[in-house]
Amino acid sequence: MRHLKYLLPLAVFGVMVWFLGQGLYLNPREVPSPLVNKPAPVFNVADLHRPELQFASEQMKGKVWILNVWASWCRACRDEHPLFVELGRQGIVPIVGLNYKDQRGDALEWLRALGNPYVASAYDVDGRVGMDYGVYGVPETYVIDKQGVIRYKHTGPVTAQSLQTKVLALVKELQG
């Protein structure tokens, strides 16, 4: 019994070390989303290029598509953007841009200078759509299936490797 009072704190310490050690092997870019495998939030917001028009996510129903959340003030968005420009040129999958908490003029200039990979650009000036999607920060990228269900979420800038091995592999699988 006397040894129990020494063993219990040691056991608690050992369990805490084990849990902390497990965290060393987690990928910080793989933030679990409660929205994966659930219907994507429906939205209807102004088009970035033509503010008098609306873009509704329902327009993408029946298609596998990518939603890329970006902003002109986001350095990491600039890093991933050439990959999306090339993907847009290839026409493999429609990419919708969600311009997040940005100034319209800055966003339009950014696309003019760096290229526009998007089949549509939704303008989320107040961040409400981003909030519905659980956006932690830009950039974030979602793969949405033909039924409008989120199948994958990538937090942070997409790399050439993650684009090929995760995003496009899933897109091709969903396209059948």
Image (cartoon, rainbow, N blue to C red):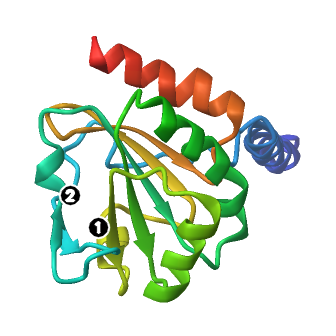
Q: Is residue 137 visible?
A: no
Quadrant of residue 46 within the rendered picture: bottom left
The quarter of the picture where the N terminus appears is top right
Q: Residues within 10 Å of mark 1 (few under 14, many from 20)?
A: few
Sequence-earlier tag: 2 or 1 = 2
Numbered mark located on residue 99 in the image = none
Q: What amino acid is found at the position of numbered circle 1 in the picture?
A: Asp
User: Label 2, label 1: how many angstroms apart (C-alpha)?
Assistant: 6 Å
Q: Nearer the viewer, residue 91 or 32?
A: 91
How far from the left and from the top, in percent, is residue 175? 29, 18
Quadrant of the rendered image containing residue 21? top right
Above or below, 98 relative to 12? below
Most distant residue in the front direction:
112
Please give left or right for residue 126 compared with residue 157 in the image.
left
Which residue is tagged 2? Answer: 41
- Pointer 2 with pointer 1, Cβ within 8 A: yes
Task: Identify the residue position indicated by label 1 in the image.
Answer: 132
Q: Secondary structure at mark 1?
A: helix
Residue at figure coordinates x 14%, y 34% from the top left = 147
Horizontal and vertical percent position of residue 18: 78, 37
Q: Is residue 118 visible?
A: yes
82 to the left or right of 98:
right
Q: Which amino acid does the dot numbered 2 rest on?
A: Pro
Query: In x, y percent, where is residue 80?
Result: 66, 50
Residues packed near mark 2 inside 10 Å, few (<14), some (14 to 19) or many (20 plus): some
- Tell me which corner region of the image, top left, top right, bottom left or bottom right, holds residue 50: bottom left
Q: Residue at left 49%, top 57%?
A: 116
